[in-house]
Amino acid sequence: MKAIIFAAGLGSRLKPWTDQHPKALAPVNGKSLLERNVLYLQQFGIREIIVNVHHFADQIIQAITDNHGWGSTITISDETDQVLETGGGLQKAAWYFKEESDFVVMNVDILTNLHLDKMIAAHQQANCLATLAVTQRNTSRYFLFHPKGELRGWRNVQTGEEKPAGLATDPQYVDLQQKAFSGIHVISSQIFSKIQQTGKFSMVDVYLDLMQNNPIQCFDHSKGILIDVGKPESIAKAETLFQ
């Protein structure tokens, strides 16, 4: 199985580090976020990875080259002309997965002890279009799932925005459960023939467009460790949990 690590973001929450460096190379106990996630994927036998780059792309490429991919074969998806967000970034890298039935997607700024093998097994057993790692934690934006675990919508609790509109008053959406997305997906390669968007777009919109006619499920790992290393204080917390 192959994977993509999204590393093209500007990392504005990690300033001042990201004024001179990409967030992918932010160090946690001497190892960059990118290195840690490459090694994380290796634990589950995944050693073929494509990494999208934009902000200080040259630094990421140099780090990969200097470290021989930390033992993995790493391909670069170049977004230096324009950052394409998660959906556009995945679509640009679609060629890399043409021989795969399923693949893994993760954000570079996520550190976790999620049992990825169990998530992959659940995805394949359910024959889903996509499986999204989630936890029960406080955040501003949530995916909304049917009690059986199927995706039904999205909500921003700060602004009140919901997708699809009218969720709160529609009887078919009663008992939906809010779950926070962990930035890790297992996706069937069939998704590439179903994506209608082009250019710069988010995977959130892809999932919300496809959920009615395609099974998209959650994999809850609330009992494990998950850190979104998007702020300087998150690095300090990560260093207490990841040696």
Image: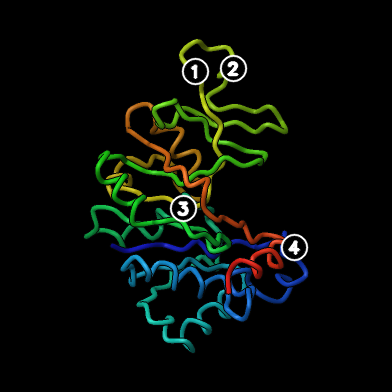
Q: Label 4 sits on what residue type?
A: Glu
Circle 3 is placed at which residue position? 184
Which one is earlier in the sequence, the residue at label 1 or at label 3?
A: 1
What distance separates the C-alpha of mark 4 from that of mark 3?
Answer: 22 Å
Circle 1 is placed at which residue position? 173
188 or 195: nearer the viewer? 188
- Residue shown at 34%/52% (left/top)? 118
Which one is earlier in the sequence, the residue at label 2 or at label 4?
A: 2
Q: Label 2 sits on what residue type?
A: Ala
Q: Does residue 52 lie above or below 227 as drawn?
A: below
Residue 65 position in % (x across, y down): 46, 86
- Residue shown at 52%/12% (left/top)? 170
Left or right: where 84 falls relative to 26: left
Q: Does residue 33 lie above or below 129 as drawn?
A: below
Pick the quarter of the image with the C terminus. Answer: bottom right
Q: Disc 4 vs disc 3: which is toward the camera?
A: 4
Check if mark 4's residue and mark 3's residue have beta carbons within 8 Å. Answer: no
Secondary structure of the residue carrying tag 4 is: helix
As drawn, the residue found furthest toward the bottom would be 66
Q: Quadrant of residue 68?
A: bottom left
What distance separates the C-alpha of mark 2 from that of mark 1?
Answer: 7 Å
Tell me the colour scheme of the image: rainbow
Pick the quarter of the image with the N terminus. Answer: bottom left
What distance separates the C-alpha of mark 3 from that of mark 2?
Answer: 27 Å
Check if mark 2's residue and mark 1's residue have beta carbons within 8 Å. Answer: yes
